Amino acid sequence: MDEDEHVDSEGAEEVEEGHLERLEAKVSELEKELQYQAADMVNLRQKSAKERSEAVRYGPSSLARKILPLLGGMERAIDQTDGADGDSFFEGTKMTLRGLRTALESEGVTHIEAINKQFDPTKMEAVAMLPAPEGVESGFVMEVIEEGYMLHERVLIASKVIVAEMTEE
C-alpha cells in the first residue's frame, strides 16, 4: 500500500503542476489584456482632450464664415459712397445689418425683447428707475439703453434698461 500512496501523490503533484501552469498562463494573459486596456484608456483620454481643444479653438468658425461676407459688404458699401448720396449707403448698411442678424440667429443668438416688458433681472440690468408715466405700470421697462442678447438659453449681454417706478403722490 505504501507504493500506491506514492503513485497517487505523484499523480496529484502532476495534476497540481498542470493546473498551476494553466493558472499562471491565464494570469499572464489577463495582465496583458489589462495593459492593453490601460493603453486604450490613455489614448482615449488624449484623443478626447485634443477634440475638446479643437472644439474650443475652431468652434467660432461657423459664425465667422457667415459674418465675413457681411464685412466685405460693409467695405464695398463704404467704398461706393465716396461722393455718392447717403441713401445708397444707408440701404447697403441696412442690408448688411439684416444679414448679420440672420447669421447670428442661425447660430442661436437672439435679441432680448425688453421694451414694455416686466423687468427681468436674469436678462436685464436696470441702469435707472424713473417715475412711471401715466399708463405704464411700475416694474416695467420704459426704455432700452443698450440691447441685450442670448445664446440659446444663456445671456450673452444683458439689456441695459430704465425701469418705471411708482411715484408717491
Image (cartoon, rainbow, N blue to C red):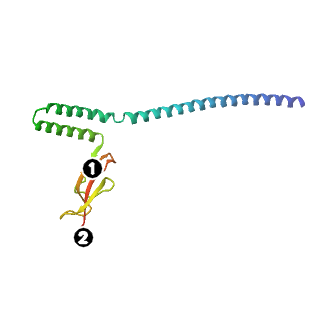
Location of residue 102 (image quadrant): top left
Q: Residue at x 24, y 61 (%)?
A: 130
Q: Which residue is mark 2?
A: 168
Q: Label 1 is placed on what type of residue?
A: Ile
**Which element type, helix, strand or loop, lies under badge 1?**
loop
**Which element type, helix, strand or loop, lies under badge 2?**
loop
Could you give the CA–CA distance between mark 1 and mark 2, rounded to whole angstroms? 31 Å
Q: Which residue is mark 1?
A: 112
> Quick one: quadrant of the C terminus?
bottom left
Looking at the picture, tell me which residue is in the foreground, 109 or 134.
Answer: 134
* On screen, residue 42 above or below 127: above
Q: Residue at x 86, y 29 (%)?
A: 6
Count of picture labels: 2
Q: Label 2 is placed on what type of residue?
A: Glu
Looking at the picture, tell me which residue is in the foreground, 53 or 78.
Answer: 78
Q: Residue at x 27, y 50 (%)?
A: 112
State which mark lies toward you, 1 or 2: 2
Looking at the picture, tell me which residue is in the foreground, 52 or 9.
Answer: 52
- Picture coordinates of residue 113, whole percent (x, y): 25, 51
How many C-alpha atoms fall within 10 Å of the one at disc 2: few (<14), some, or many (≥20)?
A: few
